[in-house]
Image (cartoon, rainbow, N blue to C red):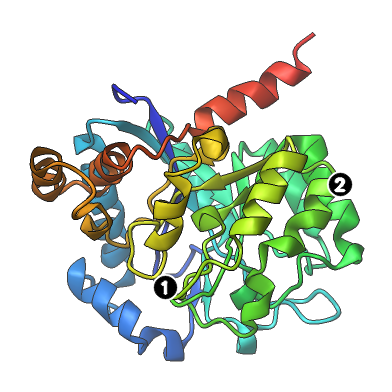
Amino acid sequence: MAGKTLIDCHVHLAALPDDNNGCYISPKMLRSPLFRFLLWKHQLSPSNPRDANRKYLDDLLTELHASRHVQKAVILGMDGVYDQNGRLNQAETDFLISNDYVLKTARAYPNEFLAGVSINPQRRDAVEEVHRCADAGAALVKVLPNAQQFDPADTSYRAFYRTLAERKLPFLSHVGYEFSLIGKDQSLGDPDRLRLALDEGATVIAAHACSYGLMLFEKFSPTFHTFARNYHNFYADISALTLPNRFRMLLHLRQHPEVHERLLFGTDYPLSVLHFAAWGRVGFGTLSTMIRTKNRFDRQVEVCNGLKLGFGSLGDLLVHSTAKTTP
């Protein structure tokens, strides 16, 4: 795809808690290797959260503005863990990026950001929160069942999925193993658990193209193809597919152009975008361009284009959803 037209549907809005952003990071998460690495890489100081949050946002905006291909990013929130009564369980929550912070940030930069709120369907007010966020301009709802400790196949969430369908908010769900956050039950990353949401009419976007995330084999590829054949409302993003633990799915999907129309562009920013999957599979000039491309948004485009992995943009999906409601 040429020109600065893409929307990255998978960009994380990281934030340290300050006095009024409603975010939370557990002490255990702050000590984790990944967070320590991100703090070091972005030169963020936990002792000054407001400045750290500003710098993370500035770094993201700088890289987005410099991209030759990506115009906008969906910045993603992260809801917490909820108990059986639907109340926030902070003791079990390691990371929370509030919807208010996501919506506020997206409103402040309407030309760069769309709001990807996060709503755990276990919460008591899940349906009301869908309506509230839709009214506030949210573009999609993102969840990470492994860390948020809910089963997407739980039939008690039917009303939640029907409301997503009614409000035409795509449901972006993590698939596969979870390493960045602390996954409690990795079986919750099985994409087959998203069947209920599809059956209730919600537009489902399976993150990481349904890749398993363990390098050795791609056990979920049959589910991807089954969903692509049987559900018009099924999509998948290509975020993180260049990482070593997921690029087997990238190499698999490049051989199946018949499903490329179901793939949406995403990076999983701030994670790295690597070019190793292209070694020995593209010409030297193409590989050299990938290596020289430092912008993560553009490198994702270069690697996938070089490997002939087709993809669309969330913008196409949102336009299609809007067109359905136009008389």
Q: Position of residue 114 (x, y in %)?
A: 49, 39
Residue under the point 59% across and 81% down: 93
Disc 2 marks which residue?
A: 200
Which of marks 1 and 2 precedes in the sequence? Answer: 2
Q: Amino acid at mark 2?
A: Glu
Q: Position of residue 178 (x, y in %)?
A: 51, 75
Asked which secondary structure carries label 2, the reply is loop
Residue 105 in view here: no
Q: Amino acid at mark 1?
A: Met
Disc 1 marks which residue?
A: 215
Reply above or below: 53 against 266.
below
| Quarter of the figure with the N terminus | top left
Residue under the point 67% across and 42% down: 228
Residue under the point 20% across and 44% down: 282
Q: Position of residue 39 (x, y in %)?
A: 25, 74
Reply above or below: 319 against 229.
above
